[in-house]
Amino acid sequence: MRIECDYLVIGTGVAGLAFARAVSHTGKVILLTKRAADDSATFQAQGGVAAVTDDKDSFDAHVNDTLKAGRGICRKDVVELCVKAGPARIADLVELGTRFTKRKGHPEELDLGQEGGHSARRIVHADDATGKEMIRALLETVKKLPNVEILEHHMAVNLIVPDRRSVDRICKGAHVLNQDTGEIYTVTSPVTVLATGGAGKVYLYTSNPDLSTGDGVAMAYRAGAGVANMEFFQFHPTILYHPQAKSVLISEAVRGEGGILRGLNGRAFMADYHPDMELAPRDVVARAIDSEMKRTGADHMLLDVTHLDGAFIEERFPNILTSCLKYGIDMRTEPVPVVPAAHYSCGGLISDIHGRTTIPGLFAIGETACNGLHGANRLASNSLLEGLVFAHQAALVAPSIPRPDYTGVEDWEVGDAVPSDEEVVVSQDWDELRRYMWNYVGIVRSDLRLRRARRRHDALMKEIKEYYWKYIVTSDLLELRNIATIAHLIIDSAMKRKESRGLHYNSDYRFEDESFSRDTVLFRFED
């Protein structure tokens, strides 16, 4: 089956929905999501949106905080654009009906949270479920738009980029798997927007939902698009440690409001690692926790808020409190056991200030993109801001993209592929890949660990490639193929960076090297 549209948007997180809303009056939009429309990493985001909305704050302060966290790899012009656009994007969401938390006793003022790395309280939030509220408001709006069609349980297989090795290549859409029927559609469009989010599932422990398999970056890289800075993978310092818990994030805001990190003996340890202690940037805090766990042999650390008023905790963190209580932990009276976990990819597809990638017709926005905002380490709560701002930026230029000639675009061919009777191979490869990525390419790396990861990964990639061409594709196989591509990019990028900077820490090169104050760029087709 063939479908034609003006905008093919892959992903229904904040970036994808905001873009679809912005361009819907100019043409037909198809939104693809491989789960339900409200199932996204954005939906799970707790903390909030970093934006200058207080007279006591300033754009310069927010810019400087972002540049400081990014350790010399940010593009200052991109940072300034994003920061200065923040207030307008917040106002737009408020007008849309987003219910941000207001300051107690001041119903006209936004309640602003404090998070690590920020020099002021500037985190606009909806209690501790900001992403959920943003998705509610955006999705309710988008569903009412006559030009927007949402295809749930549909997963992009590959981008349609004829002559992908040519300088004249153009993205003309994507082949799309209907997960309910197994049919693969050909969806053509002059504008294809990748808003597929992150790739946390490439690691054994992650805060990301199961759908975060780096689909957009993997597909675009295979089609010839440029990728940058994949070695900079952020590990959130505080994920709930419990045998039954899965991806329960304890927000940065908990430390922002006074939470203290302690060892199992009750000793607060962050003063040993950074003058800002619990409010240090995430990379510092994650390494500190990892170091304390290795030093003491403990399998977790503790996040203590028992010194805060119980009523304040109930009001400020109702969802986190409920999640912890589900596992028998009352954060009002006892410290919360926590560990670091893979959280956010600062690398992605090389893109400009309008989201345009190195392939004409192909855009990347949100976590899928690498546009120079985050550098070597993302500042807390700049991610939702990025999704909003660059969705708006992309919508400014996307309507002017000319419709290409679709002559020669081929439908999907099954060929000699047959249904698989060995799905266990997919699950085995998935588990093996995530484990060696965690052990060898995690919070702390070394040349030896990276070489070991490369050897194991090369063998696994060969096996996955053979399996892919032999059997009819399924969503599980496609996700395995994509995280394998992501792992390849992370390993390659980490091996190229012979220093420690931001989120990339190599114990063989413990300090920053000015000769590496640049992006790590990878192209599949070097010519």
Image (cartoon, rainbow, N blue to C red):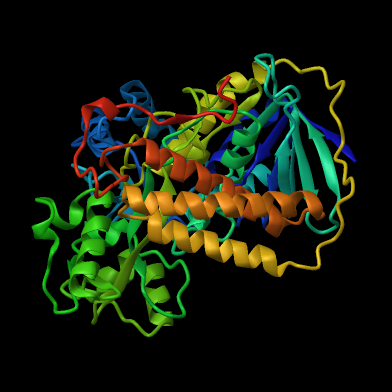
27 and 370: which is toward the camera = 370
468 and 270: which is toward the camera = 468
Quadrant of res 149: top right
Image spot of residue 110 (x, y percent): 32, 47
Relative side of 460 to 117, left or right: right
Quadrant of res 38: bottom right
Q: Residue at x 18, y 42 (%)?
A: 119
Q: Residue at x 52, y 39 (%)?
A: 368
| Residue most extreme to the bottom | 328
Is residue 442 in view? Answer: yes
Image spot of residue 397 (x, y percent): 59, 19
Q: Residue at x 85, y 36 (%)?
A: 3
53 and 347: which is toward the camera = 347
Image spot of residue 82 (x, y percent): 38, 29
Is residue 113 in view? Answer: no
Quarter of the image for the N terminus: give it: top right
Residue 415, placed above or below residue 39: above
Image spot of residue 278 (x, y percent): 18, 57
